[in-house]
Structure formats: structure tokens, C-alpha cells
Amino acid sequence: MKLDVKNIRYLSRDDWRVLTATEQGSRNHEIVPTPLIASLAALGGGGVPKSISALAKTNLIARVKNARYDGYRLTYGGLDYLALHTHTKAGTVYSVGNQIGVGKESDIFVCAAPETGRQLVLKIHRLGRISFRTVKANRDYLRNRAGGSWMYMSRLAAMKEFEFMKALRREGFPVPEPVGQSRHTVVMSLVDAFPLRQISRVGEPAALYGELMGLIVRLARYGLIHGDFNEFNILVEEKMDADDEDGPITLIPTLIDFPQMVSIDHVNADFYFDRDVTCIKRYFSRRFGFTADEPGPFFKDSTKKLIKRLDVEVEASGFSRKMAKTLEAYMKEHGVDGDAGEAERSDDDDADDAGENETGEGEGQDAQGHHHASEPLSPTPNPPTATTALTPAALASQMTILDIRDTDPLPDLSDMKPLPTSTAPPPSIISTTTTTKSAKAKAGWSI
Ligand SMILES: Nc1ncnc2c1ncn2[C@@H]1O[C@H](COP(=O)(O)OP(=O)(O)OP(=O)(O)O)[C@@H](O)[C@H]1O
Ligand SMILES: [Mg+2]
């Protein structure tokens, strides 16, 4: 979905109040009744209808007539603007530029920080847009959970990503630097590198292979499994020795994309661990003709000696057990399975997923193909090389400044929940691990 920020500068203070009121009303109304918007916005005079029509014209809210009343719902565009407002007022983002990634569940843009102009990445989570058909097929699900569910689930994905990125970064893992999070968006440092998928030659595959397997094992020793550890989610920077141009190129991997991360206590932990390992093995074999002469690594060995429990730390830090369960249930229900399944599909049968780009939004999102669609299918004779394609930093031209007229901070809606559900996910089985008993008791669960 496009992120069109050009209208953001034209929104008046009243427009922002009405947009915020619509967001607030979405807490307990799938369609927010017009009088409720008016009362939440609490504008003197007759400003509300004018703002409503301005917001509807730019597709930030959408008019919906249901059987009982007329009202409006917030669109993804409206939610994007609210998040950008917060990032701007927090001094995190100053301008937004090109889109550098289109995922099934997210859009990635370059953006820049105020003053320093430092290039950053804005990841906008968009859960629910691809599998709208599935949602439609399950009316009960829709009825029970739809009250802002795409909004809530996308926010959970962003929160989860941000919390894990913070914890991993703190422990020195090679991940982007987390900079900010608001609603369904995460701001992080821009890694000027390409996904492994686009790297055609790696010189010594064994070295990179060893490093990646080492990373999987180290994550497990910190209580975590990435869950989508594959050639799309590993960015590889090529570093040349400045004094020796013909010398060996060092490859520096950075791990991204964390919404599907699981704890080593997850009931299917060994499955996810093995899947991550297998993904890398298969990719190295197909693309580089490299096969390790040792089996493994294995889940059991990797979790014998734990260093720390980041899974437990994260759950105690704001992304709660309940949130993790809710997000996991939603992702499962919607067939969200990260890039791993996508890689397999595109390798195997050239799947064209354009037809699946149905959306729940009525305002005509463009049916963009998945970002992998433009990438070579494996095996491929001529994958783009890192030297010929534009680097993410080079793409970061043409920034649009977020010249927001509103000076008030937006209300904090961080406790925003979807409508009460009648099909709450089942409570998880609390597992017992000796190493972190006290921490677990405090947080009371496993992710
Ligand atoms: N911090 C970053 N720096 C540079 N490029 C990035 C960064 N984050 C993401 N990208 C680019 O965007 C692409 C997609 O990012 P990411 O894997 O986080 O989302 P996604 O796969 O769309 O998410 P989802 O799994 O929810 O569909 C990456 O393959 C990478 O090319
Ligand atoms: Mg990804």
C-alpha cells in the first residue's frame, strides 16, 4: 500500500482532532458513529463536519453505512498519518522517502531523522490485508474480532518487533538499531545492505554459513528462535579492506524481521528451530552449492547452556504473554508464515500471488506484488549483484518533509484493545525451566 504523505501538511488542528477521535472511537466501535466522533473531538463551533469531509476526501477515514447507523472507520492511511504525527512530535522522523520493500504484511520506507538527517527505515505493519479473503470466509471470526482487529494486530506486530529488536540490540546481536515505535509502525536504523537473496557470490560460503548457524544457536542460548530465518531476512553488507582492493571481502550479516519470533519454550520450538536451520542449509546448497560436512546444529544441544532469557525479559517489558498469544493466534488463522513459506513457494511453483492482494480497505490500495515477486527465483543464472543494484541509501533521495501544522501531542492510546472477543486464545501451558524460575514467575508465561 502506498504511503502518500503529501496531504499531511494540509491537515488543520481540527482535522487532527477528528482523526484522533475516530481512532479513539475505534476502540469499541468497528464503525464509529458520527455523533461519537463529534463528541470525542470536542471542537467548538461547527468544525466537525468540515474536518470529516476533508479526512474522507483524502481517504484517511472512510464512510460506512451499516444496518443501524452511519459512521466512519479509520483507514490504514489515517492510521499511518497518526503514527507519523507521533514520530514527528517525538523528534524521531522528519521526512519520508521511497519505499524500499513491500511485504505481505508490511511496507518499508526510508525516512530521515530531524537535524542530523540520518537515514532510517520506517516499517509499517499491515496485518490482515492479504488474507482478507480468509477473513471473509470466516464470518464468526470477523464478527468476534473485527473491531479494529487489523489495527490492533498490526500494532501488536510492531510492538513485538520493537521490543525484540531492543533486547537483541542490547545483547550485541547484529540487528538494526530500534529508534521508535508508534501504533503499527517501527522506526529503525537503515542497514545499507542487500538481502542475502540478492547476493550472487559470497567467496567463502563456509564462513558465512558458519556465522549464520552460529547466530541461530546464539539466539537459542538467549531463549529465542527467529522463526523466519531465511535469505530475505538476512541483510549482507560487503566490506572491502580499504588498503587492499583485491583482498577478501568481508560479509557482515544483519538480521531483520521479528514479528514471528518465538521462545524456546514454545510447544513447537524444535520445529521452528529446525525450520530456520533447514532454510539456510537449503539456500546455501541451491545457490552456492555448499553443503556443510557436519550435521546440525540441533535444538537440544543449543539450549543446553542458556546465557540469558530474552524471551522472558521481553514479556516482562511491555509485550505481554497475552499479546503474544493473541498475535500468534491471528497470524496462524491468517496463514501468516513469514518469508520462509514464500521462498519455498516461489522456488517450487512460480506462484503468482497478485490475485491474493485483496484488501479490507475500500479506498483502492494498489495491488502490489510481494516484494519477492521482482526478485529472481532460485536457482537463477543471473541474480542482481550488490554492485549493480541501487543500495538502500542511494534510494533514499526525494524525501518529503512531514510539515505537520498541529502542535498538540496526540493522546496516548497504548491501552487500545479490540472489541471484547468471545473466542479468546486458550491460555498457554506454563512450562517450567529451571534457569529463570524467578523471572518466569514474575512474568508468568512463555511466549
Ligand atoms: N533496517 C533495514 N535496513 C535496510 N533495509 C531494510 C531494513 N528493514 C527492511 N529492509 C528491507 O525491506 C525488506 C522487507 O523487510 P522485512 O523483512 O522486515 O519485512 P517483511 O518481510 O515485509 O515483513 P513480513 O514478514 O511481515 O512480510 C527487506 O528484505 C529489506 O530489503
Ligand atoms: Mg522479511
Image: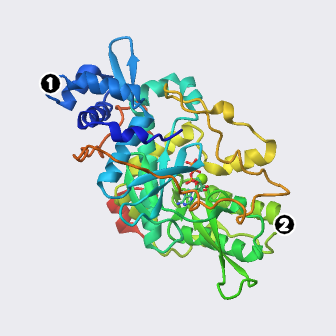
Measured as percent of width and height from the top left, residue 197 is found at: 71, 59
Question: Ligand 1 falls in which quarter?
Answer: bottom right
Does residue 95 sit above or below 77 in this rendering?
below
Does residue 435 sit above or below 77 in this rendering?
below
Q: Residues within 10 Å of mark 1 (few under 14, many from 20)?
A: few
Q: In terms of image quadrants, where is residue 391?
A: bottom right
Measured as percent of width and height from the top left, residue 56 is found at: 38, 25
Q: Is mark 1 on a helix, strand or loop?
A: loop
* Residue with the most extreme front position: 398
Mark 2 lies on residue: 289
The quadrant of the rendering that contains the N terminus is: top right
Q: Identify the disc placed on residue 301.
A: none
Residue visible at 47% across and 62% down?
A: 119
Disc 1 CB within 8 Å of nearest ligand 1 atom: no
Q: Which of 133 and 33 is in front in this view?
A: 33
Q: Mark 2 or mark 1: which comes first in sequence?
A: 1
Measured as percent of width and height from the top left, residue 217 is found at: 60, 71
Mark 1 lies on residue: 45
Measured as percent of width and height from the top left, residue 22 is found at: 30, 31
* Residue with the most extreme left position: 44
Q: In terms of image quadrants, where is residue 30?
A: top left
Does residue 26 sit above or below 371 in this rendering?
above
